[in-house]
Image (cartoon, rainbow, N blue to C red):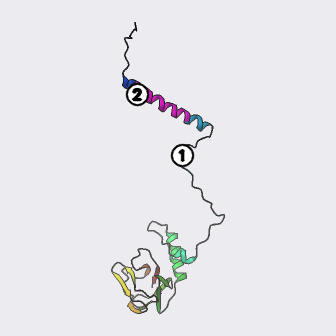
């Protein structure tokens, strides 16, 4: 005759104990292998693998002038940018645009004077000096506009080409 124990274990308890033992076995196995450096650490992100050149390439003045200081930039950064704009500024009868790349990059203009926008491309371009002031220049043509669209007077202004939100050139209004 088989003796039955007074203590009964339900199937749920046996299942739960099995799952707990299995998880503990996995964790213990991982820790042992980790200690032996057989598996990578699961809790660290992989390090980026790239080579940093010994000397970073220096930016040209033209590249640096297109990096505008933010309103929170220190005053010395703003002054240095304005000085670079003044150094690169060129006064000309024409602001040439071809493939949305202006020449000169920094165009010096007197507020109230006329400027000739010359499109050297085979497609039309729209130059945007602010959201309200945009000029369509047909392909292969020149359009004369009056430089009276500066809201706050003389200063440094970026402008865009076509629908790009990125500045392509700078106006130095004096």
Q: Where is residue 9 in the image (x, y as percent from the top left)?
A: 38, 19
Figure quadrant of the N terminus? top left
Q: Which residue is drawn at 54% across and 74% down?
A: 64
Q: Position of residue 137 (x, y in %)?
A: 39, 88
Instruction: State the residue position of label 1.
Output: 44
Query: Is residue 152 in sight in this rendering?
Result: no
Q: Is 24 within the magenta?
A: yes
How would you rate the neighbour count of disc 2 (Cα within 10 Å): few for under 14, some for 14-19, many for 20 or more?
few
Q: Position of residue 59 (x, y in %)?
A: 58, 73
Element class at badge 1: loop
Total labels drawn: 2
Q: Residue at x 55, y 50 (%)?
A: 46
Residue 25: numbered disc: none
Mark 2 and mark 1 lie on one chain; the one further toward the N terminus is 2
Q: Specify the quadrant of the image occupied by residue 117.
A: bottom left
- Pick the front one: 77 or 93: 93
Q: Give the range drawn in magenta.
A: 14-29
- Pick the front one: 172 or 118: 118
Q: Residue at x 65, y 66 (%)?
A: 55
Instruction: State the residue position of label 2.
Output: 16
């Amino acid at each position: 005759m088989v003796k039955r124990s007074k203590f009964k274990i339900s199937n749920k308890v046996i299942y739960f104990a099995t799952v707990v033992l299995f998880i503990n076995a996995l964790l213990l196995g991982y820790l042992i292998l980790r200690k032996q450096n057989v598996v990578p650490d699961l809790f660290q992100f992989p390090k980026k693998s790239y080579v940093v050149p010994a000397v970073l390439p220096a930016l040209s003045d033209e590249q640096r002038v297109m990096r505008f200081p933010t309103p929170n930039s220190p005053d010395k950064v703003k002054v240095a940018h304005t000085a670079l704009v003044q150094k690169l500024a060129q006064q000309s009868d024409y602001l040439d645009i071809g493939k949305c790349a202006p020449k000169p990059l920094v165009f010096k203009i007197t507020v109230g004077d006329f400027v000739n926008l010359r499109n050297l491309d085979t497609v039309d371009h729209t130059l945007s000096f602010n959201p309200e002031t945009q000029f369509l220049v047909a392909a292969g043509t020149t359009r004369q506009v009056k430089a009276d669209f500066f809201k706050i007077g003389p200063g440094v202004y970026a402008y865009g080409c076509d629908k790009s939100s990125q500045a392509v050139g700078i106006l130095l209004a004096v």
